[in-house]
Amino acid sequence: MYIFIKRTEYPESAGDKITQKLGLEIPYYEKSLDTVVRYKLKHAPLAFLICCVVGFISGTFGLGAGWAIGPTINLIMLAPLKVATTTSAVIISIGDTAAIVPYFISGSLIPIFAVPAVTGLMAGARIGAKVAVRIKAKYVRYILTCILLFVGVRLIWVGLWMMR
C-alpha cells in the first residue's frame, strides 16, 4: 500500500510514461538542503480520478480539499512533500474562490466576517510560504500530521456530540 512508504518527504520513484509525457516532473531548489530536488511521479490517472472525486465532494458539501489533495499527490503520485503541499494550497485557493460566487450573488456573504478571514489567510499564506522554504520537509510532515490528527479527532468528537 502506498500510504506506508518510508520516505514521504522525498519519495523515490522510477516514474512512468504518462507523467513523463505530461511533463509533470519539474525540479525545484530546496533551500533547506541547498540542492535541487529532482523527482519522478507515478499513477497520474489514479491521482486524477481521486482529485476529481475529492473536488466533487469539496464542491458539493463545502469542505476544503486539502485534507485529501496533498496526501494524494505525496503518497500516490510520490511527489515530494513540499510539492504536494504547495499544489494543494493552490487548488484550495482556486476552489475557495470559485465556491464563494453563488453565495456572493445570492447575498449570503457577510463581509464583516469574510474580510478579516481573508486578511488572516493572506498573512498566514505569506508567512507559511517563507517558513516552508526554509525548514526541512520532515518538519512540514510533522506539522501537517499533527494538524490533520487534531482536526480529525475534533470532527469525530463533534459528530458524536451531534448524534446524541
Image (spheres, rainbow, N blue to C red):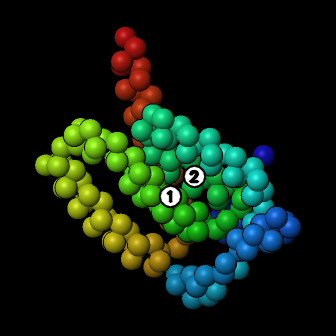
Tell me how far mark 1 sits from mark 2, CA to CA: 8 Å
Residue most toward the left? 112
Q: Position of residue 62 (x, y in %)?
A: 42, 38
Instruction: Report helix, strand or loop for mark 1.
Output: helix
Give neighbour class at mark 1: few <14, some 14-19, many 20+ (Cα, 10 Å). some
Residue most toward the front? 105
Q: Which residue is mark 1?
A: 91
Q: Residue at x 36, y 66 (%)?
A: 125
Instruction: Report helix, strand or loop for mark 2.
Output: helix
Q: Is residue 72 above or below residue 7?
A: above
Name the N-terminal-most of marks 1 and 2: 2
Give neighbour class at mark 2: few <14, some 14-19, many 20+ (Cα, 10 Å). many
> Which disc, if any, is residue 69?
2
Tell me if residue 143 can be seen. Answer: no
Quadrant containing the C terminus is top left
Q: Position of residue 10 (x, y in %)?
A: 67, 69
Q: Indicate left or right for 25 with 84 as reference.
A: right
Q: Residue at x 47, y 61 (%)?
A: 89
Q: Are the residues at dot 1 and dot 2 in contact (C-beta closer than 8 Å)?
A: yes
Q: Residue at x 40, y 27 (%)?
A: 157
Residue 121, quarter of the rendered image: bottom left
Tell me if residue 81 can be seen. Answer: yes
Tag 1: residue type? Answer: Ile
> Which disc, if any, is residue 36?
none
Q: Position of residue 63 (x, y in %)?
A: 44, 40
Residue 123, quarter of the rendered image: bottom left
Q: Position of residue 42 (x, y in %)?
A: 78, 61
Tag 2: residue type? Answer: Ile
Of the pair 83 and 92, the residue shown nearer to us:
92
Q: Residue at x 24, y 54 (%)?
A: 117
